Image: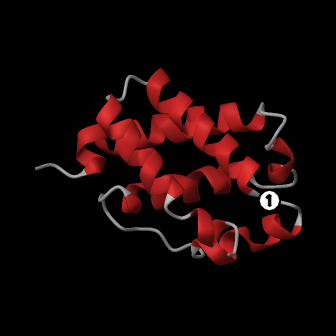
Amino acid sequence: MANLYERIGGEGAVNAAVDLFYRYVLSDGRIARFFEGVDMDDQIAKQKSFLTMAFGGPNNYSGLDMRNAHKKLVAKGLNDSHVDAVLENLGRTLHQLGVGEPEVKEVLALADSVRGDVLNR
């Protein structure tokens, strides 16, 4: 069986999803403030690399682990409601791009599985 990366469409699909996802996130008043002062080109490139690896594609990710990558955001007040908003935007992105429901559920479950690390719990 093909891995998640292949089932959602590989590199092209990940790139399209990350680009659309950040458009949604940056316009979402619940979470946009966490990206103030962030080099979004760098952030988008890191996210594409991370998701490619997380979905079973080539592993070229060299960024921080989830706990360390989000530590400063937790200090700024990042909490479950913000993670929920991110997941909502991610689901919206995948649906907008026509990703199948089984894959959307798998992506959201994978993203939610790191909630504890993201929130440093």
Residue 104 visible in image: yes
- Where residue 88 sits, quadrant-wise, is top right
Q: Amino acid at mark 1?
A: Leu
Expressed as whole percent of the image width and height from the top left, the position of residue 74 reads 80, 67
Residue positioned 61% across, 50% down in the render = 44
Position of the C terminus, as image quadrant, is bottom right
Circle 1 is placed at which residue position? 78
Which scheme is used to colour this image of the protein? secondary structure
Residue positioned 67% across, 32% down in the render = 23
Assign a secondary structure to mark 1. Answer: loop
Expressed as whole percent of the image width and height from the top left, the position of residue 37 reads 87, 54
- Where residue 47 sits, quadrant-wise, is bottom right
Looking at the picture, does residue 120 appear above or below residue 77?
below
Q: Is residue 99 left or right of residue 119?
A: left
Q: Is residue 37 left or right of residue 49?
A: right
* Along the line of sight, the residue nearer the viewer: 102 or 72: 102
Mark 1 crowdedness (10 Å alpha carbons): few <14, some 14-19, many ≥20: some
Expressed as whole percent of the image width and height from the top left, the position of residue 115 reads 60, 62
Looking at the picture, does residue 108 appear above or below residue 42?
above
Residue positioned 78% across, 31% down in the render = 27
Looking at the picture, does residue 4 appear above or below residue 27?
below
Looking at the picture, does residue 62 appear above or below residue 8?
below
